[in-house]
């Protein structure tokens, strides 16, 4: 299928080192973010003069107008911030970059996220003026693990065949992929099934290794049109679709309201959007070679496998138990960098970069001949988001 | 003495949820309903999602509800809860109140005995300064 010249593609990626939260103290959060963007510009074979837009999410505090000055952009034509406090906005920011580029309002937009949690607040903690905090804090629910475990319990009630063995498989898959990735925070630490089950409870049904890392780091991705990409040396990765949004009634969703419609309560809030995403891309779930699925919590990955149509409702446990998500032989390896459970938690941006690496043939868990990759944004929140990438070769 | 220590975060009423807390201060568990079309909504919002009316009424829920979901919190997300770990967070539905559910706690229960669908009874926890918070016990 031919892709039109004005359509958006990814031409550059850049990232800082990744450390445990509070680990980067030798330079500022703004600096590591600027360095990640500079690395992405260089990776694209561009200069600052080629960049004219910024898109970010989760109230990223690395101010785009200041970034434009710091990096010496001659003219800015786009800047946007996605509402919502979490990683649901990662691919939403990518979708805004696509909108900017495909409409002609900007030539090349940087999608970025950077955080050093020893320098600023620790993400997800109590005391940040959470929307609807009045309705959860007095009951001792303070952090995402405590909010989303309510959703997970309901999901396991509706589908009693889903067990901790399946959640364990998500965690073990992430860790074994991280063990092959020298950049992963957990590169040198193996994880066994016994260690998973010995992990302390955080908020039942989530144990320690069901929960993502907390990371210092920065990631940046450059989006431009296919027409402009042809003037560059590197391989461009097509964006067949990038969408964000929500079903009805989510609002603060599990993070505060907990009053999503019954039919969608125990879900990633992606069902409707996923269908539209595959229609837009003109392919079906069985065409996806590799996927990076937002793993803030192991169990939400199971839900996503169902909501994105890789298996029927309630069958994700059986799907992962079959080895389907494992590198190298599974039919659709997932979270091949180690994901957010074991590589780094840069709120979905490191998953997007790993998606690009797979389609460039540069992953440390490279899926042979990978042509298509699904990358999701944060799951079970509003907005949530997702994209389908395809290599041009 | 309240279920959690006194330094537990308290509701901080704002423009849009003030009426909700006034009911709690009088030990009335009420959900917000549209004053024109009657649609229920929670958490409180200043306009009706069904008809865009800004008229509001408050409907008192039954004192017995049903567990929609629950968790067991083992990790202290705030220093105030350290002495209370582990505790049960819960989401409760009420008969005759379709589409709304309440985040709360179930107390006086072995966490291992918790089940979705179990019936729970309301009790009012005195958190001081004239404010009460609804929590539940197994029925």
Image (cartoon, coloured by chain):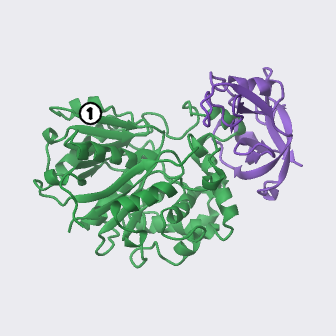
Image coordinates of residue A69 in percent, x first then y, are 21, 29
Residue shown at the point (45%, 58%) measured from the top left: A274
Q: Is residue A187 left or right of residue A368?
A: right
Residue A104 at what x, y percent from top left? 21, 42
- The purple-tinted chain is B
Chain of the residue under label 1: A
Check the rendered structure and report the hue given to chain A.
Answer: green
Q: Can you see residue A205? A: no
Name which residue lies at 76% across and 29% down.
Answer: B58
Residue at which label 1 appears? A67
Q: Is residue A34 visible?
A: yes
Q: Residue visible at 65% across and 44% down?
A: A259
Quarter occupied by residue A328: bottom left
- For image coordinates 47% across by 75% down, the residue present is A324
Which one is nearer the viewer's eye here, A301 or B101?
B101
Q: Is residue A261 above or below residue A280?
A: above
Which quadrant does the N terminus of chain A fall into?
Answer: bottom left
- Most foreground residue, A172 or A158: A158
Question: In the figure, is residue A12 to the left or right of A160?
Answer: left
């Amino acid at each position: 299928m031919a892709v039109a010249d004005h359509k958006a593609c990814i031409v550059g990626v850049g990232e800082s080192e990744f450390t445990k939260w509070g680990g980067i103290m030798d330079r500022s959060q703004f600096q590591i973010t600027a360095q990640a963007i500079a690395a992405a510009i260089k990776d694209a074979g561009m200069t600052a003069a080629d960049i004219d837009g910024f898109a970010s999410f989760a109230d990223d505090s690395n101010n785009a107008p200041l970034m434009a000055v710091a990096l010496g952009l001659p003219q800015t034509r786009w800047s946007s911030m996605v509402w919502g406090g979490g990683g649901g906005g990662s691919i939403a920011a990518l979708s805004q970059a696509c909108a900017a580029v495909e409409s002609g309002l900007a030539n090349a937009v940087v999608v970025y996220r950077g955080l050093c949690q020893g320098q600023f607040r620790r993400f997800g903690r109590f005391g940040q003026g959470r929307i609807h905090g009045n309705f959860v804090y007095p009951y001792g629910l303070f952090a995402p693990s405590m909010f989303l475990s309510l959703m997970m319990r309901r999901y396991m009630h509706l589908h009693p065949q889903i067990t901790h063995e399946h959640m364990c498989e998500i965690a073990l898959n992430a860790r074994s992929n991280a063990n092959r990735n020298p950049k992963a925070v957990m590169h040198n630490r193996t994880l066994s099934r016994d260690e998973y089950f010995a992990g302390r409870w955080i908020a039942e049904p989530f144990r320690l290794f069901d929960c993502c890392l907390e990371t210092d780091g920065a990631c940046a991705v450059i989006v431009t049109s296919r027409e402009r990409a042809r003037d560059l040396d590197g391989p461009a990765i097509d964006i067949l679709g990038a969408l964000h949004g929500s079903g009805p009634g989510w609002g603060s969703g599990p993070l505060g309201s907990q009053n999503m419609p019954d039919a969608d309560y125990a879900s990633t809030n992606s069902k409707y959007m996923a269908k539209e995403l595959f229609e837009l891309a003109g392919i079906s779930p069985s065409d996806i070679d590799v996927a990076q699925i937002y793993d803030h919590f192991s169990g939400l990955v199971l839900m996503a496998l169902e909501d994105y149509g890789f298996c029927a409702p309630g069958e994700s446990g059986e799907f992962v138990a079959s080895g389907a998500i494992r590198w190298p032989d599974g039919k659709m390896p997932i979270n091949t960098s180690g994901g957010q459970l074991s590589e780094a938690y840069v709120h979905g941006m490191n998953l997007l970069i790993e998606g690009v690496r797979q389609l460039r043939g540069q992953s440390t868990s490279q899926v042979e001949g990978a042509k298509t990759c699904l990358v999701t944004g944060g799951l079970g929140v509003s907005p949530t988001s997702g994209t389908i990438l395809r290599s041009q070769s | 003495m309240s279920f959690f220590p006194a330094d537990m975060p308290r509701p901080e009423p704002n423009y849009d949820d003030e009426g909700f807390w006034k009911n709690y201060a009088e030990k009335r568990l009420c959900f917000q309903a549209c004053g024109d079309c009657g649609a229920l909504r929670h958490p409180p919002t200043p306009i009706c999602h069904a008809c865009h009316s800004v008229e509001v009424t408050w409907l008192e829920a039954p004192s017995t509800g049903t567990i929609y979901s629950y968790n067991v919190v083992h990790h202290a997300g705030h220093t105030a809860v350290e002495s209370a770990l582990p505790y049960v967070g819960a989401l409760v539905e009420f008969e005759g109140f379709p589409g709304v559910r309440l985040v709360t706690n179930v107390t006086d229960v072995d966490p291992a005995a918790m089940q979705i669908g179990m019936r729970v009874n309301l009790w009012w926890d005195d958190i001081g300064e004239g404010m009460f918070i609804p929590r539940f016990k197994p029925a």
